[in-house]
Amino acid sequence: MGLCLKRSPLACSALAKQNGSMADVELAVVTGGNRGLGLETCRQLAARLMRVVLASRDPERGRRAADQLAIEGFGVVAMPLDVSSALSVEKFARQVAERFGRVNVLVNNAGIALDGFTAEVARTTLVVNFFGALHVTEALLPLIATGGRVVMVSSGVGQLDGFPDALQRKLESPQLDRGELATLMQSFVNDVRAGRHKERGWPSSAYKVSKAGLNALTRVFARELAGRDIHVNAVCPGWVRTDMGGKSATSGVKEGASGIVWAATLPPDGPSGGFFRDSEPIPF
């Protein structure tokens, strides 16, 4: 009880629940959780009495972030995860399975926005923003419990209004599956490398394409996992003051993370397969 004297009532309640029986506590995994939106999402989910795995590419930064939340009274476990590495993703999924046995919430937050537009920028951006979310979700799928929630942290930049009709139809097709979508995203990288992306209709923005692909992946997984009552949604957190968003952004991290947390805590009758900003649907 003495430890709680310096903490908020909400933090004390979360700590008491997390230190009690773990059988009743939901397990949330947040990728890219060591800073910015990811860190704040971990904080807000822990405040909602969830056990949180803070996944971070840099193990030391992940530990420091978890220590920071522990000081605030939240039980968060730091685990290393490089979403761009197949070996790292496989090891991470195995460790989560061995330590916790299940996942109730997965927040695919890890992402990058690089300067310039080259073949290497296109490749690296897609590897992290699209294929990273795809591979982490696939690796954790056997652990995601019935009624679980998967959140793709996306961006309004990925909306399809800047794509030609032919690409829009492909990305919106109800018959699109994971393999076809992955092939389509790889074709963008190949087209940039070959200098033909414009004639194929692709925008000259790897970030935009990666987020459009992530939104399409949201719809694919939502259809696929409907039979397991797993909700899969994409969330645009808005323009947030983080290292990526910059100091001129219009929203703080608490506000930006709130929409992510809303999607991560949906009730059983909540939406799936949607794209949301401020908990309200927006066009893909």
Image (cartoon, rainbow, N blue to C red):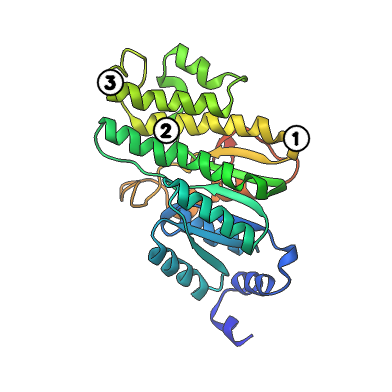
Asked whether disc 2 touches disc 1, contact meaning CB atoms under 8 Å apart, the reply is: no
SS under mark 2: helix
Mark 2 lies on residue: 210
Q: Residue at x 49, y 75 (%)?
A: 71
Q: Residue at x 40, y 20 (%)?
A: 162
Give the mark, 3 or 1, whose residue is nearer the N terminus: 3
Give the mark, 2 or 1, whose residue is nearer the N terminus: 2
Q: Whole-percent x and y of residue 85?
A: 42, 47
The quadrant holding residue 191 is: top left
With 214 as the anchor, is 11 left or right in this view? right
Callout 2: 10 Å neighbours few (<14), some, many (20+)? many
Task: Please state, as top left, top right, bottom left or bottom right, where the N terminus lies in the image.
Answer: bottom right
Going by the numbered disc 2, the residue's amino acid type is Ser
Asked if one can make out residue 205 in the rendered structure from this viewpoint, the answer is yes
CA gap between label 2 and label 1 equals: 27 Å
Going by the numbered disc 3, the residue's amino acid type is Ala
Mark 1 lies on residue: 227
Asked whether disc 3 touches disc 1, contact meaning CB atoms under 8 Å apart, the reply is: no
CA gap between label 2 and label 3 equals: 18 Å
Callout 3: 10 Å neighbours few (<14), some, many (20+)? few
Going by the numbered disc 1, the residue's amino acid type is Gly
On screen, residue 73 above or below 199? below
Tell us which disc is closer to us: 3 or 1.
3
Q: Whole-percent x and y of residue 226?
A: 71, 34
Q: Whole-percent x and y of residue 257?
A: 51, 51
Mark 3 lies on residue: 194
- As rendered, which of 137 and 47 lies closer to the eye? 137
SS under mark 3: loop
Q: Whole-percent x and y of residue 90?
A: 52, 50
The quadrant holding residue 102 is: bottom right
